[in-house]
Every structure is written in structure tokens, then in C-alpha cells.
Amino acid sequence: MALELKDLRDLLDKAGTYRPGRGIPEPPDENEVARCIQTMLARQCIYPAQPAFTRLHKIMACPDYQGFFQRYFAAMGLELHHDTKSGMLALKVPSADKRRFDWQHARLKKDETLVLFVLKLSYEEGFQARTMNAEGGVEITTDDLVDKLDAVAKTRIEETRLMAILDMLKRKGMVAVGEFDPVERIRLLTVLPGIEIACPEHYVQLIAEWATQQDEAEPEEAEAVAAYEEIENV
């Protein structure tokens, strides 16, 4: 490559000295490095149990290779976070005062923010009750989510729209969505550790303050209320 980062060349050159049996994955090639970067920018959070990302996760979780990705994302103002307990790899803005400049960054809409907020509350409740599963997730149902949206945010979201929001958060690694139960007419949801990356305490406080004043905001102001304008989403 004519325009090649020295750090990238150092990473790729590890293939020349790699020896199997050391307990670390084979070094990535150029295409795999690109896939790792593009996957993190598109997904925000990935986990070791996701078959589609097994190889990419092993590369970025390996201490021998992780430094390259940490430096790469740091140059973008992002932190590559590795939660060794759950295995989660996630991109996050290092602090609340950091601003985003990339054109792809879009603030969440009002209903998306409220769903994110309620999922975070459910996660915290599960953590406090010690009902987390082996992967660090908290299981609830869509009925639980709807009830909490009504109780906390005085909000009802139409089912099709709610599923669209959950699908978006699923792609970002915030929640796993189970199959529809035709008898109970619910879906099992697993709130994943990535919810803490997408909704840190700083934003929880902003949303909570907004929720106490929600009657003052018009429903159409989907992107105008400061409480959810602050949400940073990769």
C-alpha cells in the first residue's frame, strides 16, 4: 500500500513470526483489519458469542493485536473498550465533554431515546437484583418494556415502531430480541452490557430531568429537547 500506516504494517508483519500453539489467534491480514474497523463503526458493540463476529472478536480482543485498534480509534476521538467479564468489545466516547464531528453521527429520536433509557433502567434493576445471566445480560419481555415505558415516561409506542427501534438497538449490540411467543404474545428481550456504553450515567441524568418536564414538550419535537439531544450514538 502506498498510503500505509506504520502501525498497520507492524500488525501485518506479525504473520511472519507467528507460531501456532501460543494460545493467540493467527494475526489478521489486511482485509480482516478493515473488516474489524468497519464492523466496530457499524455495530458499536460485539460479543464473543456472536458467530458472525467470532474471528473479528478474537483479533481485537487479543492483547498482541488490540493496541493497533485502540490507537486507530483513539485518533477518531473514540475509545475501544474491552469488558473482560462479558467479553464485550465496544466503541465509546471517552467523556461527556467530547463532541462528535463525523457526518454519520445522528442523534436519537425521542422514542428511540426513551426505549434506550428504559432498557438501561431494566439493566440496572437486574444488576442490583443479581439476575444477570452468564453473559452479563438481563432478561425482560416486551410486555415489561411497554409497562415500564408507560410508568416511567408516560409513553405508548405502537408495536411496529417499537420492534423497529429494538431491531436498531439489536444491530448496535444493546439488546437481543427473541422469537415471538404466539401464546403469551410477547418476545423475550436480553438487555446486553452494551447498554451501559450507549446510555452512561451522564445521559441517564439528562433524560431523567427531561422526563419530569415532558408535559412542556410538544410530541412533534422529536429532535429538539436537550435531554435526548445529548445522546452520543456511534
Image (cartoon, rainbow, N blue to C red):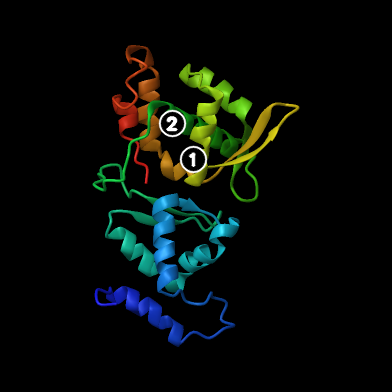
Along the horizontal axis of the image, is 49 left or right of 67? right
Q: Residues within 10 Å of mark 2 (few under 14, many from 20)?
A: many
Q: Amino acid at mark 2?
A: Glu
Helix, strand or loop for disc 1? helix
| In the foreground, 82 or 147 | 147
Note whether residue 197 is visible.
yes
Residue 73 vertical position relative to residue 22 in the rendered view, above or below? above
Write the residue at 47% across / 51% down: 45
> Which residue is denoted by mark 2 in the rendering?
112
Residue 135 vertical position relative to residue 215 in the rendered view, above or below? below
The disc at residue 169 is: 1
Write the residue at 73% across / 29% down: 182
Write the residue at 33% across / 14% down: 218
Which image quarter: residue 87?
Answer: bottom right
Quarter of the image for the N terminus: give it.
Answer: bottom left
**Residue 10: image x %, image y %?**
35, 79
User: Which of the two discs, 1 and 2, labels the residue nearer the N terminus?
Assistant: 2
**Residue 41: image x %, image y %?**
39, 53
Q: Amino acid at mark 1?
A: Leu
Is the residue under label 2 in contact with that under label 1 (CB below 8 Å)?
Answer: yes
**Residue 65: image x %, image y %?**
43, 71
| In the foreground, 49 or 199 | 49
**Residue 81: image x %, image y %?**
42, 56
Most extreme residue toward the right is 183
